[in-house]
Image (cartoon, rainbow, N blue to C red):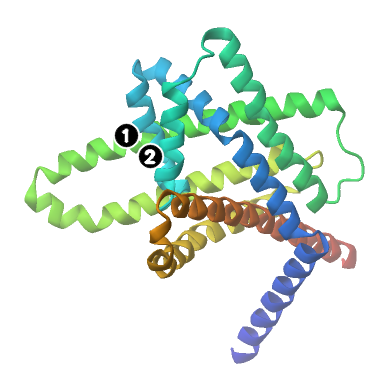
Amino acid sequence: MAGRYAAVLHTCGRALTKIFVKFSEDDGPLLASGLAFAILLFCIPFSLLLVMALEVALGDPHRALVALQAILTEFLPLSREAFTKNLETAIENRGLVGVLGFSMFFLMSSLIFGSVRAALNTVFQVPRPSSFLKATATDVLVMLLASGLLLLMVALTSLFTLARGAVERGPHLEALIGPGWVFASDVLGFLFTFALLYLVYRFCPSQCLQRPALFVAAFAGAALFELSKWAYAWYVELSQKNIVVYGAVGDLFFFFVWIYYACAVVILGAETGWVVQQTLQASEEDF
């Protein structure tokens, strides 16, 4: 039994070593920086696009913004206020409306996934990228699928909130079911992150991983993302006393750090999937 555990630990250690070596060889920190810059540049147009879609569904821009905050709570822990304030300002002062404004937001939002495609092509060592037209069509497709997934997340979060409010009206039910809400919320967030990363890893790169490696990449990315939220909360708690004097600038600092952190997690998840695929291919060749 001890020998089996030692073998498992040895295998995991070798896999982790390969992942971080590959991450270093691909200039992972630089890829994460480029991806973070693209997200910072185009996240406001993409968020406005979501708000416009939610506004059509809900009939009220303020309700749409509240619904979007449910997603921000999941993806921007402790730093969502800085992003939300800028988004509210953009919504209040948006001058381009209608078909023209929607088209511009649509075009700029699709560029986010073009940046993701370029980074994943590097990680997956794609020898021949897709043509411009095919890549653009893929970016638009991924943007539509991701938007649909985000809207589904908003709907599920709203239902979850309504159910929780109904339970809270009964003291006995709240005492019985209350602890399960936190677990259910964490599971929902993990599944949503897994689905989003699976979508990104599956459609964004010009050459996709095999299905087993794809599942491992999405699972690893989602797990790292959940762990990074705890680590980020701890980091903010330690740093808050030293940076609170900077006010809104401090909030923006944490927002920028979190964006880079999340992009690094996306790259690490992709590296994990690539290492798993190479291992599986080597095993098949041995047989």
Disc 2 target residue: 70
Give the numbered dot on residue 158. 1
Q: Image point 43% across, 29% down: which residue? A: 89
Q: Image point 86% across, 51% down: which residue? A: 125
Residue 192 % position (x, y) = 49, 44
Q: Image point 60% across, 46% down: which residue? A: 197
Asked whether 21 or 242 is in front, the reply is: 242
| The quarter of the displayed image where residue 132 is located | top right
Q: Are marks 2 and 1 in contact (CB under 8 Å)?
A: yes
Residue 181 % position (x, y) = 28, 52
Category of crowding for the residue at label 2, using alpha-carbon neighbours closer than 10 angstroms: few (below 14), some (14–19), many (at least 20): some
Label 2 to label 1: alpha-carbon separation: 8 Å
Asked whether 63 or 171 is in front, the reply is: 63
Q: Amino acid at mark 1?
A: Ser
Q: Amino acid at mark 2?
A: Ala
Residue 30 % position (x, y) = 75, 56
Q: Is residue 70 left or right of residue 23?
A: left
Asked whether 86 or 18 is in front, the reply is: 86
Q: Image point 63% across, 51% down: which residue? A: 263
Q: Is residue 71 visible?
A: yes
Q: Is residue 200 left or right of residue 238?
A: right
Disc 1 secondary structure class: helix
Asked whether 78 or 119 is in front, the reply is: 78
Total marks drawn?
A: 2
Q: Is residue 208 visible?
A: no
**From what the image shows, is residue 17 above or below residue 228?**
below
Q: Residue furthest bottom?
A: 2
